[in-house]
Amino acid sequence: MSFEFDPDDQVHLRSLARLESEKIAWIVTSGRDGYPHAVPVWFLWLEGKAIVFSEPKTAKVANIRTDDKVALHLEAGADGEQLTVLRGTAVLHDDAAIEWVADIGDDYTAKYEDGLRGLELTAASMAQRYSTVIEFTPEKLIAW
């Protein structure tokens, strides 16, 4: 069951706008040791889901293989009072980033142009290294 943003709720609208514009989110998975594992990621908000490219041998990918429950949260905003946390599930698409880039590469490049340039990558070359796609579907919003 995916989460639906309420178009009449100002907190929902602000959270959605931030998901569409923020460059960094934190993805939280359950580590093998039972502790939460939180890492910053680049992401695209697409049709109600967060799309993350990852190197295949990362802890977050290994953790999702074991437990698909994931949290995704944004920083607290400029005033420190704009909490946006989504809880949901993640699906892994192995060796799929090149296919995804064919569909969303222009949007990804537009969002992360400076960062890609700084790493001397294009969306296509990044997809070769970060070949696993994490598709996060929210089930609950915690925000104010």
Image (cartoon, rainbow, N blue to C red):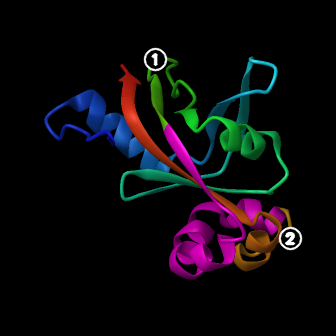
Tell me the element at label 1. loop
Residue at (63%, 43%) from the top-left corner? 24
Residue at (81%, 39%) from the top-left corner? 59
Q: Main secondary structure of the magenta part?
A: helix
Q: Which residues are drawn in magenta? A: 89-118
Label ID, residue 119: none
Q: Is 100 inside the magenta-drawn segment?
A: yes
Label ID, residue 81: 1
Q: Position of residue 143 (x, y in %)?
A: 38, 23
- Closer to the chain start, of discs 1 and 2, is 1
Label 1 crowding class (10 Å Cα cut-off): few <14, some 14-19, many 20+? few
Q: Position of residue 10 (x, y in %)?
A: 23, 30
Report whether 143 appears left or right of 5.
right
The amino acid beneath tag 1 is: Glu
Quarter of the image for residue 124 reads: bottom right
137 or 47, nearer to the observer: 137
The amino acid beneath tag 2 is: Glu
Q: Quadrant of the N terminus?
A: top left
Question: Which residue is farthest left?
Answer: 8
Q: Is 53 inside the magenta-drawn segment?
A: no
Residue marked by disc 2: 120
Quarter of the image for residue 98 reads: bottom right
Report whether 96 appears left or right of 35.
left
Report whether 128 appears left or right of 77.
right
Q: Where is residue 123 in the image (x, y as percent from the top left)?
A: 70, 74
